[in-house]
Image: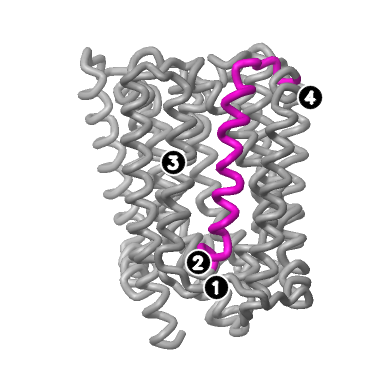
């Protein structure tokens, strides 16, 4: 790896961490406050709107952002074409949502989402205007400005949301916060543009990007559908309150995924793409990324799963106690997903988006099978079945990764097994301690259990393989 590329990747990791952690930690704090001010039903209405818009936004972006990042070279004419297509698609989709919102609300048996969905659909157009600019910042490792942008947008929109919630605006506090965040992000992207639209349009260059993004688009549609359809099914079958309970557990899971995995994933795609022509360097970078994720992200998810019941009550309040078991299952899934995302980024960087499509198809099939075959009257059973289905598909992703990347199973196992064993022991220690530590203060119980799990993991992971631990620290320092 050249010093220039090494420096860009390391700087990108640092500023991507600032961007993701600043944004998500700020967002998480705001989310905690809003959860205490709003009811599960209000969160459920917003969760349904959010799920629909996130799914539709995939069709607006069309996988072009990653195509721009992955391409060996990108011309202004290609960017102009992508910008025009994204903008036109966003207008069409936004108009369709406004017209069809009554039918969507009736189909989901959630009439309360109709007007909020129509208003919030404006965010589709707002976000589309920034896709190209955001992709260029990622391509050029300009994560410092992205970090500042995300943090500012989070704080400004969060302040608006909390202010409206305190004034009793209910679900509209969340809707206005969502639109405000989209507008702030767009404004801050265009304050310092890396590219400006012009009349030069290269449809041939667009077609080159489309060959990569079309396979990625189909994969993203299925990936988004895999999560969003499950959420909407909960709302339609069990009502807005149950969806609200699920959305709290799910939101914590998603934020932690972004905090722990998106930093490496975001920069990883850019870095892996620059090394795609050198198999040896690529494989070594893959080992480092997988090992670091297994050592850091995976145990945090396992510890979160262990203390999830205490976490939800302490942070959100006792009205959200039913979200604890949901978060518990989703955090276990997150431990595996955090590693899968690195595998997926490596496959995508090699230009094999068709392989990620196969993985996503398998995940979607598992989700559909669960929705068809499991009862619709028990939220926790649905969540458990969803997690089992996703975990059963996991080996396929690594099998396809091995075929494309060429890593050795034994080498990978040697690097990660101490952390897997230590994380399992940490989870078990919390389960045992909970039987004896009957404390009235939920905050004290949460603190003691989390501290116990962290201590067990740290001691055991170092003890099992001191050399692997030292090597991982060295890799993190010199990545």
Magenta span contains residue 189: no
Callout 1 touching callout 4 (CB < 8 Å): no
- Percent coordinates x, y for residue 68 in the rendering: 61, 70
Q: Earlier in the sequence, mark 1 or mark 4?
A: 1
Q: Categorize mark 4 by other alpha carbons within 10 Å: few (<14), some (14-19), many (20+).
A: few
- Tell me the number on the disc at residue 272: 1
Residues drawn in magenta: 107-135
Give residue 104's position: percent from left, percent from top.
Answer: 72, 25
Q: Measuring from the top left, give residue 78's x and y in whole percent.
A: 67, 74
Residues 176 and 391: in front is: 176
Label 1 vs label 3, nearer the camera: 3
Task: Name the residue nearer the viewer: 159 or 299.
Answer: 159
From the image, state whether disc 2 or disc 3 is nearer to you.
3
Give whichever of 314, 168 is nearer the camera.
168
Task: Work out whether residue 347 or residue 80 is closer to the camera in this orientation and state it.
Answer: 80
Contact (Cβ within 8 Å) of mark 2 with mark 3 = no
Label placed on residue 268:
2
Reading the chain from its start, which is encountered first: label 2 or label 3?
3
- Which disc number belongs to residue 180? 3
- Spatial distance from mark 2 to mark 1, Cα to Cα? 6 Å
Residue at far front of view: 199
The residue carrying mark 4 is 372
């Amino acid at each position: 790896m050249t010093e220039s590329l090494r420096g860009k990747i390391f700087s990108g990791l640092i500023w991507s961490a600032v961007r993701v952690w600043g944004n998500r930690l700020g967002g998480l704090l705001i989310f905690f406050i809003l959860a205490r001010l709003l009811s599960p039903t209000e969160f459920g209405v917003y969760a349904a709107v959010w799920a629909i818009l996130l799914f539709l936004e995939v069709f607006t972006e069309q996988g072009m952002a990653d195509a721009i990042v992955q391409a060996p070279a990108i011309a202004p004419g290609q960017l102009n074409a992508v910008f025009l297509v994204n903008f036109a698609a966003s207008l069409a989709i936004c108009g369709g949502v406004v017209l069809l919102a009554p039918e969507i609300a009736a189909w989901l048996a959630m009439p309360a989402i109709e007007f909020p969905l129509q208003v919030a659909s404006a965010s589709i157009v707002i976000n589309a205007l920034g896709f190209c600019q955001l992709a260029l910042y990622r391509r050029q490792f300009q994560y410092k400005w992205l970090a500042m942008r995300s943090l500012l947008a989070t704080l400004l929109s969060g302040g608006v949301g909390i202010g409206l919630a305190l004034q009793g605006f209910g679900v509209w506090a969340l809707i206005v916060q969502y639109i405000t965040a989209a507008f702030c992000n767009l404004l801050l992207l265009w304050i310092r543009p890396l590219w400006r639209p012009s009349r030069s349009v290269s449809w041939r260059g667009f077609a080159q990007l489309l060959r990569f993004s079309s396979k990625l688009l189909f994969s993203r549609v299925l990936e988004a559908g895999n999560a969003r359809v499950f959420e909407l099914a909960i709302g339609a079958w069990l009502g807005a309150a149950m969806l609200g309970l699920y959305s709290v557990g799910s939101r914590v899971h998603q934020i932690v995924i972004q905090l722990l995995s998106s930093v490496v994933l975001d920069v990883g795609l850019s870095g892996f793409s620059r090394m795609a022509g050198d198999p040896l360097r690529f494989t070594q970078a893959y080992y480092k990324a997988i090992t670091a994720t297994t050592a850091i992200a995976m145990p945090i998810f396992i510890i979160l799963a262990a203390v999830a019941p205490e976490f939800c009550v302490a942070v959100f309040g006792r009205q959200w106690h039913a979200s604890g078991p949901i978060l518990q299952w989703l955090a276990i899934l997150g431990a595996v997903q955090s590693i899968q995302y690195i595998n997926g980024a490596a496959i995508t960087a090699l230009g094999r988006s068709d392989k990620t499509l196969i993985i996503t198809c398998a995940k979607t099939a598992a989700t559909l099978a669960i929705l068809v075959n499991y009862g619709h009257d028990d939220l926790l059973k649905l969540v458990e079945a969803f997690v089992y289905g996703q975990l059963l598909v996991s080996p396929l992703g690594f099998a396809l990764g091995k075929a494309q990347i060429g890593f050795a199973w034994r080498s990978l196992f040697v690097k990660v097994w101490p952390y897997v064993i230590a994380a399992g022991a940490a989870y078990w220690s919390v389960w045992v301690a909970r039987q004896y530590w009957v404390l009235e203060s939920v905050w004290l119980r949460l603190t003691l259990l989390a501290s116990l799990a962290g201590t067990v993991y740290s001691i055991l992971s170092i003890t099992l393989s001191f050399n692997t631990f030292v090597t991982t620290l060295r890799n993190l320092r010199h990545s």
